[in-house]
Amino acid sequence: MNRNRRNFLRDSALATVGFVGLSKFADRAAAQGYRSEATGYGPLIPDPEGILDLPEGFTYQALSRTGDRMEDGLRLPGKPDGMAAFEGENGEVVLVRNHELSHTQVLEGPYGGQREGMDRVAAADIYDPRDGRDPHIGGTTNLVWDPVSGAVRRQFLSLTGTARNCAGGPTPWKTWITCEETMERAGDGNQKDHGYNFEVAANAQPGLSRPIPLKAMGRFNHEAVAVDPKTSIVYQTEDRHDGLIYRFIPNQKGKLAAGGKLQALVLRTKERA
């Protein structure tokens, strides 16, 4: 492991610790009433950009903004949600991001207000094109970042035509599972059912992952997933008031598209004598 990789892992661990501390601070602030002060770090300094107030000596970096022109000529979609960072080549970091968009949110989609960018994407790469003029615009983007210079090298669309991509989770084989948080069916404009998981490659070069729904993993209001690195078993949560916890046992380790068995957690209770 080279020095840059060690630094990346170390910095990631420190960031995790920092967010745990921030979470605890937020909990205390909610209980005690908000004060514009980070305990132990001094008062928060108002951010001229109006994005994030931080104590003196702290900084942040905005990597990209909705509407940015990407490497593939498309616009960076809005509504970013679940995401994961992967170690790329030469110390770079590849960030795969969900965009929780429905087909009605055209102005925040990747194609432009008049969908003028659709000719940049092959029809076969759009999971649900609907009538061909009003496709679903949820999906994912990949961003490649150089932690040494702090520069964004490139960003591009990596999955398109899905709906309300909310959360998901990374896999041990370096892909991202993106989850649709919807139960829309074919009909009423849709060509296909929704409510599935899709697998996205953490590629550093522009290109779309094939929009193959992982149907054996279930069709429901997906939220997050976690993969056991030893068995490739996937644990899934559902975002609804009576949602379940699921376990997907793949037929082949590391190959979710090859099918498997879906199970739901059941609690058994014994009657008292």
Image: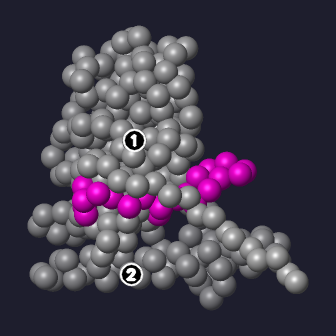
| Marker disc for residue 13 | 2
Q: Position of residue 55 (x, y in %)?
A: 57, 75
Residue at 29% over, 57% down? 251
Q: Which residue is mark 1?
A: 215
Q: Report whether residue 27 is seen.
A: yes
Kindly identify the amino acid type of the residue bearing the numbered disc 2: Ala
In front of the other: 207 or 126: 126
Residue at 32% over, 63% down? 171
* Marks 2, 1: nearer the viewer: 1
Q: Secondary structure at mark 2?
A: helix
Residue at 50% over, 41% down? 219
The secondary structure that dominates the magenta segment is strand
Q: Which segment is the magenta one?
A: 235-255
Q: Position of residue 214 (x, y in %)?
A: 36, 44
Q: Counting other residues with Cα less than 10 Å from the Cα at mark 1, is it few (<14), some (14-19), or many (20 or more)?
A: some
- Is 11 covered by the magenta stretch? no
